[in-house]
Image (cartoon, coloured by chain):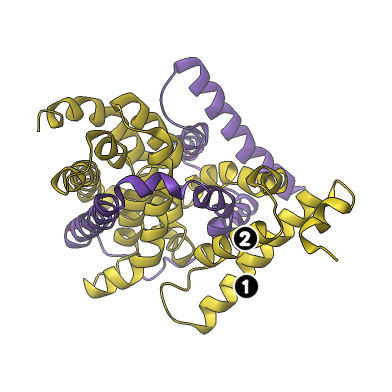
Chain colours: A purple, B yellow
């Protein structure tokens, strides 16, 4: 029962996100709005998510890579789009991604707080 | 026997089922390869995409055929994105303590991703349409497509670049941060989410609650920030 309740909560938030997007015309995908709504609910109510919901979300997130395979396969079919300007595209993609990674990680590492021992993996 | 027509000669419901089994099997195989081969290129997402792509090619199955089954896996991306709220709530105290560093890192990453992508394409002689398509490549695919369309890029090219950029982050995040001697899980999650969105962060999200929490913030915040900043900054870039 608690498993179904967890799936219900996640899908309900996604649906609320999609509905909010449709009426407000904001350019943010429904699931991202749903994520903000669910986080806001627990933060404002000062409550911990139930263990069942934590298990369901950890379960989904530990296989997140798998969920990108269908979209990734679709991209292979569109690789011809890159052929027109493959050199600027590949240098810019690699260079810009690397710069973004390094800048974000360095600032957060240099100025952010350290993880305490009680935090652990999913 | 002609193997290429096999999926179509069986019952019609078998193609979706085959697509799901193929995707799960290819990913599980990729996970096994990753366990045995400690090389960042041995990434389960990359391995699965290659195996599925090659299989579809040899069986003459179209992407539309494949998606009749793969859509069920794709659908789970929605609730999985919502589920990122849970590690965020658990990491709330840590986020309060690191609020300003987090905002600074997000702003810097967002601006650098947007501007450097555009600038490098232009410096190497790429067209303005290609450069504008490169600008939103760090964003989650639906936002990348929307931003690309609004600033004059090619939306389908931005979608390809968003996925390729995500794969690049998933493959390179561990070696790059090891080279920088950064092992802070919050920095890892924030950087992966800012540079490579969900696909990029899929590598670090299972590693630590804090990585998952900060990746969730980065995916949402970078999408919203760039959607707001891009239409303001891009007209200035176009003069160059």
To the question of a shared chain for discs 2 and 1, the answer is yes
Residue B147 vertical position relative to residue B27 in the rendered view, above or below: above
Residue B132 vertical position relative to residue B59 in the rendered view, above or below: above
**Residues under numbered marks 2 and 1 in contact, where contact means CB atoms less than 8 Å apart:** no
Mark 1 lies on a secondary structure that is helix
Question: Residue B52: which disc?
Answer: 2
Residue A49 vertical position relative to residue A108 in the rendered view, above or below: above
Q: CA distance from mark 2 to mark 1?
A: 12 Å
Q: Chain of mark 1?
A: B
| Residue underneath mark 1 | B29
Question: Residue at 25% of width from left, 31% of height from top?
Answer: B230
Residue B91 visible at all: no
Q: Nearer the viewer, residue A46 or B215?
A: B215
Q: Position of residue A98 (x, y in %)?
A: 25, 59
Q: Position of residue A55 (x, y in %)?
A: 62, 57
Q: Position of residue B13 (x, y in %)?
A: 85, 47
Nearest to N terminus: mark 2 or mark 1 = 1
């Amino acid at each position: 029962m608690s498993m179904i309740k967890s799936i219900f909560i996640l899908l309900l938030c996604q649906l609320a996100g999609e509905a909010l997007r449709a009426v407000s015309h904001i350019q943010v995908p429904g699931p991202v709005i749903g994520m903000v709504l669910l986080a806001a609910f627990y933060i404002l109510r000062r409550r911990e998510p139930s263990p069942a919901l934590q298990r369901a979300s950890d379960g989904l997130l530990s296989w997140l890579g798998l969920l990108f395979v269908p979209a990734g396969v679709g991209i292979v079919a569109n690789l011809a789009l890159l052929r027109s300007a493959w050199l600027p595209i590949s240098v810019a993609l690699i260079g810009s991604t690397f710069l973004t990674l390094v800048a974000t990680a360095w600032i957060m590492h240099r100025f952010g707080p350290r993880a305490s021992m009680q935090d652990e993996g999913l | 026997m002609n193997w290429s027509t096999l999926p179509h000669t069986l019952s019609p419901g078998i193609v979706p089922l085959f697509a799901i089994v193929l995707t799960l099997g290819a990913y599980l195989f990729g996970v096994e390869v990753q366990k045995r081969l400690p090389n960042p290129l041995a990434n389960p997402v990359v391995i699965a995409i290659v195996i599925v792509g090659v299989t579809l090619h040899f069986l003459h199955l179209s992407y539309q055929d494949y998606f009749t089954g793969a859509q069920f896996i794709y659908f789970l991306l929605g609730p999985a994105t919502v589920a990122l709220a849970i590690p965020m709530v658990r990491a709330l105290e840590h986020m309060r303590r690191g609020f300003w560093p987090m905002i600074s890192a997000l702003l810097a990453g967002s601006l650098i991703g947007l501007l450097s992508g555009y600038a490098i394409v232009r410096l190497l002689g790429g067209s303005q349409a290609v450069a504008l398509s490169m600008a939103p490549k760090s964003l989650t695919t639906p936002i990348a497509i929307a931003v690309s369309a609004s600033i004059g890029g090619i939306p389908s090219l931005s979608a390809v670049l968003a996925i390729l950029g995500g794969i690049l982050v998933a493959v390179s995040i561990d070696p790059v941060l090891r080279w920088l001697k950064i092992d802070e899980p919050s920095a890892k999650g924030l950087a992966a989410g800012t540079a490579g969105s969900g696909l990029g962060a899929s590598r670090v999200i299972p590693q630590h609650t804090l990585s998952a929490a900060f990746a969730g913030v980065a995916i949402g915040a970078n999408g919203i920030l760039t959607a707001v900043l891009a239409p303001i900054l891009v007209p200035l870039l176009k003069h160059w």
